[in-house]
Each structure stands twice: as structure tokens, then as C-alpha cells.
Image: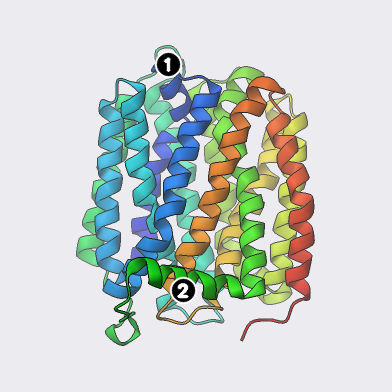
Amino acid sequence: MRILFLITFVNLLGFGLIIPLLPFYIERVGGGPEIITLVIALYSLLQFLTAPTIGRLSDRYGRRPVLIWTTVGVIVSHLLLGFADSLWLVILARSVGGIAAGNVGVIFAYVTDISSGADRAKFMGYLGAAFSLGFMFGPVIGGVLAGADVETANFMLPAFSAAGLTVVALLCLLALLPESLQAEYRSDTTDSAAATLGAQLRTAFANRTFAILSVIAILLYISWSALLSIFALWNNRVLELGPRDIGLIFMYSGFIGALCQLTLIGPLTKRFGEPALLLLTVVAMGFGLWAMADATTVTATLIAMTLLSISHSMFSPVSTSLVSKYALPTERGVLLGVFQGVGGFGRVLGPAYAGVAFAQLGSGSAYMIGALLMVPCAMLAIAVVRRPAPA
């Protein structure tokens, strides 16, 4: 688990370098707010489309080889971004990165392979902390490397640094990470990929609780991704902050998320149970988005970001742990891939509307829309609380 934590952290550190810079990168090559959010949505769309297939491949051939090849894809995407001097090259780089990002479900499947049901939420929290820590340090390093001024920012150095960090993650993966899926638990189906995936999708969504959790994930990730897609622009327009300061706010967000995942998820899950904790995360997300829509100062932004970071950091491991309880060892990869793909679909829809709302309805409108989406999301979470626990 420590090795997987290290690899995930280093990989996400490289990814985090790009987060506060991408909107300004796209602006420099000629894209406006609508184009910026559509490029971000394209990344999530490709992740959504590829995650189930990548998960199925890991069920068939093992987690390790799939993680190796997708990590190579991440390296290629960072290198392409570093060399990009036109909008189409930026789009190509993010497309390659989105395809490779379909491996998130495989990473979570690896954790389910090596953990028991009782400790699974806690281990999911540890893995989520690796994501949060990478998200914490990556943006601030990227912001420092780029500089404080948007007009003179250096975007090549962060992109190449991200590629270098991902190479380190790949070397650690090759040298230190063993295969987690034993041969007797691998899928041995001889059906076509489409037929296999279609059958497993039908099986997954035939379970009502899995379907409810999927809708909750879509709504929550719509709201969260809308926030992220315009957050840099919003900070620049409303608070007049540059890449370095925006990176520091992302660092704070990652710190709060990692702190919650490392210290709170295990004890809270044991005390309240995963369904109740799921409901609390949805409520916190709603209040955080509402507060962000009204924020006009750095202090108010940090308060809102605290609620949002707590919510997001809790939701991913808790919901993924719940989903894993419906999966057999031979299908965890594809089911968790489906669930991560569902989240990816939400991350497509969020940026798709956020750019238009930002440009046409006002800087805080996307946040308010997200807060309203949390109302039906909370109602569905209540339904999960009331349903019997999975066997």
C-alpha cells in the first residue's frame, strides 16, 4: 500500500503542476472561457469513454501492465503540452492525457485486491490522500515555475517538469509494484470486448443502489468540475490573483483533503457508516458551493474551499468503497472503471456549462447552479442511507 501511495502521489504531483496553468495556456493560444472549459471537458469525456475498457483489461491481464502503459500515456501527454504552440496541439495533449486517465479505476481496483472489506474505506482514504497531496503540492510548484504574472508566465517548464515526475512514477511502478490480481481471480471470458462490457454494465446498473450511487457521482462531479474548470479564471477576474497565488489556494485545498483522508475517514466510517458519511459529503458540497458563489475576498474563498475540499476528499473513497462491495474479484476492475467513468461523465458536463455560465451569466453563476444540483443529490443520498447494506 505504501508503494502504491508513493506512485500515485508522484503521478498526481505531475498532473497537479498543470491544473492552475491550463486556462491561461489555452488563452495564450487563442481560446476564450468557453473553449477553455470545453478542452477540460474533452479530457474528462475521454476518461469516461475509456475507463470501463481499461478496467476490463486489468481484470483480464492484471493491474500492473495496464498501469504501466497508461502511465506512459500520461508522460506523452505532458511532453506534447510542453511543445504545444497552437490550440490543436493543446487539444491533442489533453486528449492523450484523458485516455490515459482512464486508469483511475484500476488504481482503486488494486486497493480492493489487497484490502479486506472492513478496512477498505480506510485504505481508499489513504489512496485518496495521495491524490490530495499531489493536488496540494503540484499546483503551487506549477505556479512558482510559471511565475506570478499571467502575461509573462512560462508554461513549458511546468509541463516538462510534470513529464519528469511521471517518469519517476513509472520507474517506481516498474521496480517496486507487484501484481495484485492473482491468476485465479482474473476474468477468462472469451466474448468480444463490446459484449463483455455491455453485459457487465447491465449487471452493474441492474443493482438499484449502484445506479443511485452513479447518479450521485454524476451530480457531484458536475458541480466540482465546474468549480475547478473556471476557478483560475474566477480568481484572476474577481480576486485579481495570478498563477502563483492560485496555486497556493490549490495547495491549501489539497492539504485539507489529505488531512481529512488520512485522519478522518477511517474513524468516521466506523462510527457513522459509509452511507451516512456519503450524505454528509453531499450536504457539505452544497454549502461550500453556495458560499463560493457569494465570495468576494480571499478569506471567504478559503472558507468555502475548506467545505468543498472536505466534501470532495470524503466522497471519492467512501463512494468507491460502497461500490466495491457489489463487485466480485473478477469484475472489480470493470465495475470500478464504470464508476470512475460515470464520475468522468460528470466532469464532462460540469466544464461544458461552466464556461458559458461564467461568460454569459456572471462569474459566480456556475457555483450557484452546482449548489442547486446538490438538492436532488442529497435526496438520493438519503435513499442510500435507508437501503439495506450490501452483502
The amino acid pointed to by label 2 is Ala
Q: Which circle marks residue 30 in the picture? A: 1
* Residue under label 2: 199
The mark closer to the camera, 1 or 2, is: 2
Q: Where is residue 215 in the image (x, y as percent from the top left)?
A: 65, 59
Quarter the C terminus occupies: bottom right
Which secondary structure, mark 2? helix
Q: Where is residue 232 in the image (x, y as percent from the top left)?
A: 55, 28
Q: Position of residue 340 (x, y in %)?
A: 50, 59
Task: Please state which of residues 385 and 237 is positioned toward the viewer in this rendering.
Answer: 385
Q: In which quarter of the image is residue 16?
A: top left
Along the horizontal axis of the image, is 379 left or right of 249?
right
The amino acid pointed to by label 1 is Gly
Q: Residue at x 35, y 20 (%)?
A: 154
Whether 53 is drawn above or below 35: the answer is below
Q: Quadrant of residue 358?
A: top right
Q: How crowded is mark 2: few (under 14 residues within 10 Å), some or many (20 or more)?
A: few
Quarter the N terminus occupies: bottom left
Residue that extends furthest to the top in the rendered view of this protein: 151
Q: Residue at x 42, y 58 (%)?
A: 51
Task: Please state which of residues 297 and 70 is positioned toward the viewer in this rendering.
Answer: 70
Q: Quadrant of residue 190?
A: bottom left
Q: Is residue 314 visible?
A: no
Q: Residue at x 78, y 43 (%)?
A: 372
The mark tally for this picture is 2
Q: Position of residue 337 (x, y in %)?
A: 45, 63
Q: Which residue is drawn at 59% across and 54% down?
A: 313
Report, in whole angstroms, how far the alpha carbon at label 1 lies from the one at label 2. Answer: 44 Å
